[in-house]
Image: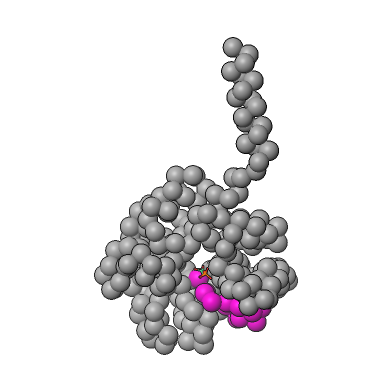
Amino acid sequence: MKFFIDTANLDQIREAQDLGVLDGVTTNPSLMAKEGISGDNAVKAHYKAICNIVDGDVSAEVIATDFDGIVREGESLAELHDNIVVKVPMIRDGVKAIRYFSDRGIRTNCTLVFSPGQALLAAKAGATYVSPFIGRIDDISSDGLQLIEKMRLIYDNYGFESQILAASVRHTMHVIECAEIGADVMTGPLSAILGLLNHPLTDIGLEKFLADHRGSK
Ligand code: G3P
């Protein structure tokens, strides 16, 4: 399973990259706003800065919601760097634009996916990545992981090449469960990735090894 980090914070991206397990980055307009990045030029410069840190796919989201606007923005984002993946919302014109991009070799990430039907449509349109928002589904007392299971089944039934990008991952158990179910990619906060390190028996065991090593001198 690929690990993407879901942030526009350059320090956190560097930290995840330094760990040696990072395969890419996802961002969205909210994450950009959180870092105080606004305006076309600043946003584009920030995407370039991210691409210079990570050697992997970087999702850059369009703001337009009409076909012509999505195509215009997407083409301009894709020109920024070879690793840019154009992130397009799951709306009618978005699906149309995903097909347009796919036919021209521009890679896409279909975002805001909340149902198996939407996931099927995104795959039919040729999306490179399809992003179910599992945390937000959990937030409304439903089961985000079940959506991943259904997507896995549908994509495997027909050999769709779209990759399931589990998004809105909130914590470490989400990461593990996504891996068990067979998500192709998960994108989450740095804390969810670092949480994978933790086990009390590792800490206790290491402490004892080091104490024994000191004692045997
Ligand atoms: O990857 C999608 C993500 O940014 C949304 O996460 O936590 O706002 O639901 P969240």
Give the residue displayed 39% in from the left and 79% down from the top: 63
Give the residue displayed 60% in from the left and 49% down from the top: 196
| Image vertical order of residue 99 relative to residue 109, above or below | below
In this rendering, the count of numbered labels is 0
| Image vertical order of residue 212 relative to residue 181, above or below | above
Q: Which residues are magenta?
A: 109-124
Q: Is residue 192 shown left or right of residue 212?
A: left
Place residue 144 in its image quadrant.
Answer: bottom right
Q: Is residue 81 shown left or right of residue 128?
A: left
Place residue 124 in its image quadrant.
Answer: bottom right
The residue closer to the viewer here, 137 or 45, is: 137
Is residue 7 magenta-colored?
A: no
The residue closer to the viewer here, 92 or 103, is: 92
Q: Is residue 162 visible?
A: no
Give the residue displayed 47% in from the left and 76% down from the top: 88
Give the residue displayed 64% in from the left and 25% down from the top: 209
Tell me where residue 89 appears, x and y as whole percent. Answer: 49, 79
Tell me where residue 90 appears, x and y as whole percent. Answer: 53, 81
Tell me where residue 201 appears, x and y as whole percent. Answer: 68, 38
Is residue 119 magenta-colored?
A: yes
Screen quadrant of the C terminus: top right
Q: Is residue 138 visible?
A: yes
Screen quadrant of the N terminus: bottom right
| Image vertical order of residue 42 relative to residue 53, above or below | below
Tell me where residue 104 appears, x and y as whole percent. Answer: 44, 74
